[in-house]
Amino acid sequence: MKPLTLEPIHSPLSGELAVPGDKSISHRAIIFGSLAKGTTIITNFLDGEDCLATIKAFQLMGVDIEQQHQKVTIRSKGIDGLTEPLLPINLGNSGTTARLLLGVLAGLPFHTTLYGDQSLTKRPMDRIAKPLEQMGAKLDGREMGKYLPMAVRGQSLKGITFRPQVKSAQVKSGVLLAGLLAEGKTTIIESTKTRDHTENMLTAFGGNIRVNGNEITLVGKQQLTAAKIQVPGDISSAAFFIVAALLVPNSEITIKEVGLNHTRTGILDALAAMNVNIEIKETAHVGGEVIGSITIKHSQIHGADISGDIIPRMIDELPIIALLATQAKGKTIIRDAEELRYKETDRIDSVVQTLTALGANVKPTNDGMIIEGGASLKGTQLNSYGDHRIGMMIVIASLICEGNITLIDAEAINVSYPRFFEDLKKIT
């Protein structure tokens, strides 16, 4: 794809949008639909590259999956109907597919090899491999099991009690999936509650799981049954348009049918701390997930301290919040976000480098960044680093820049939001 020229706009944003389906929930719907017996129908599926990688993985294991844009039909014989893949499984750029699939494969009687693109090959997998090995899994990855490519020799697993050392829903979910296939009881005790889509999805497919505060328990060898799943709009995708409306003078937009799961709405709490003008209405409860609408008006933004338990609830939204903070009154400090260093890029470094190139005053710290508000941003040539969220952050920054931005590797945005530019046009 040729470099993309992005021009500032000179009029308010207005209108309504329905953002694509939630990426985390789309992944899990494919996984649970493939493990459940019967025909599962998924609507508002996110047909981005990451979620398509999850579909391809289960197709290689013999699951009949038909995908037509945002509708997916899965015809599965259940866990016992999965077959050993003949080829190594290419996960592309999808860390979610990697960590959740390791949990599934660890308990299946297969030999499988997983690999990904250059970015995924640098992301740590030992955080999920170690608890799986405690359950009896046999895994062999690069650098003593830390990185992909990784070979899995499925074993009979036993449930464990696990206290995650990192605040990661992917690690939690991988262990829960392994626990579903294991003998006995698996208990996970989190220090901070992470997104709970796996727990909700397991219940939607007829599974039995007990959640008591930050303690989650399930018994293995359960049989799941097919379900109909409506995927809510992805609040992580909505975040880019929320910030766009806050930045562009006189703007007002409404985003419909967005997922408002409490474990994902840290961004709304952060925006409240930044004193912005935002209205939230809950409209439905579907499959354990809350869905609603968000109306955003241009606001005077104030700097804030964003840290603590809110961070796992908004980890993917921190890059776009950092952009917002460059236009705030006062200083914003983001702390306790070291997990950003283990995303598609080191998002602390990539955010700091990108915003600094635009003219902002941003300093990295070990676990976050310090952002001085009131910056005048100027267009320049930038690279997405192959990271979809950095790419979208740059596009939103271009709306208020002085001069044009030239964006290299804009196609990275397709990972989570293939129609991003189409939706942006709807409100400009």
Image: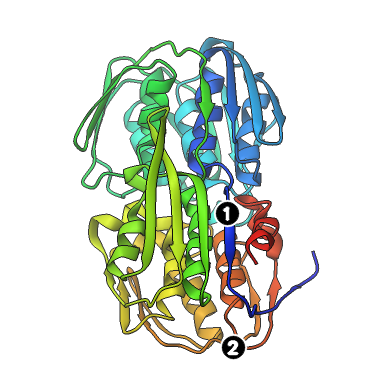
Q: Which residue is found at the position 63% from the left and 85% from the top?
A: 379
Screen quadrant of the C terminus = bottom right
Q: Secondary structure at mark 1?
A: strand
Q: In the rendered image, which residue does mark 2 sit on?
A: 378
Q: Which residue is found at the position 43% from the left and 70% from the top?
A: 348
Q: Position of residue 132 (x, y in %)?
A: 38, 32
Residue type pointed to by label 1: Glu
Q: Secondary structure at mark 2?
A: loop
Left/right of residue 400 with respect to residue 70 in the rendered view: left
Q: Position of residue 189 (x, y in %)?
A: 22, 37
Judge by depth and name the residue closer to the eye, 342 or 308: 308
Gap between marks 1 and 2 measured at Cα = 29 Å
Question: Is 165 situated above or below 367?
Answer: above
Q: Residue 192's mark?
A: none
- Mark 1 surroundings: few (<14), some (14-19) or many (≥20) residues within 10 A: some
| For discs 1 and 2, the disc positioned in front in the rendered view | 1
Q: In the rendered image, which residue does mark 1 sit on?
A: 16
Question: Is 84 situated above or below 334?
Answer: above
Residue type pointed to by label 2: Lys
Question: Is 351 situated above or below 284?
Answer: below
Count of marks placed on residues:
2
Judge by depth and name the residue closer to the eye, 275 or 6: 275
Q: Position of residue 187 (x, y in %)?
A: 24, 28
Screen quadrant of the N terminus = bottom right
Left/right of residue 73 with respect to residue 337 in the rendered view: right
Judge by depth and name the residue closer to the eye, 25 or 420: 420
Q: Which residue is found at the position 36% from the left and 69% from the top?
A: 276
When asked about the image quadrant of residue 131, the answer is: top left
- Mark 2 surroundings: few (<14), some (14-19) or many (≥20) residues within 10 A: some
Q: Residue furthest right?
A: 2
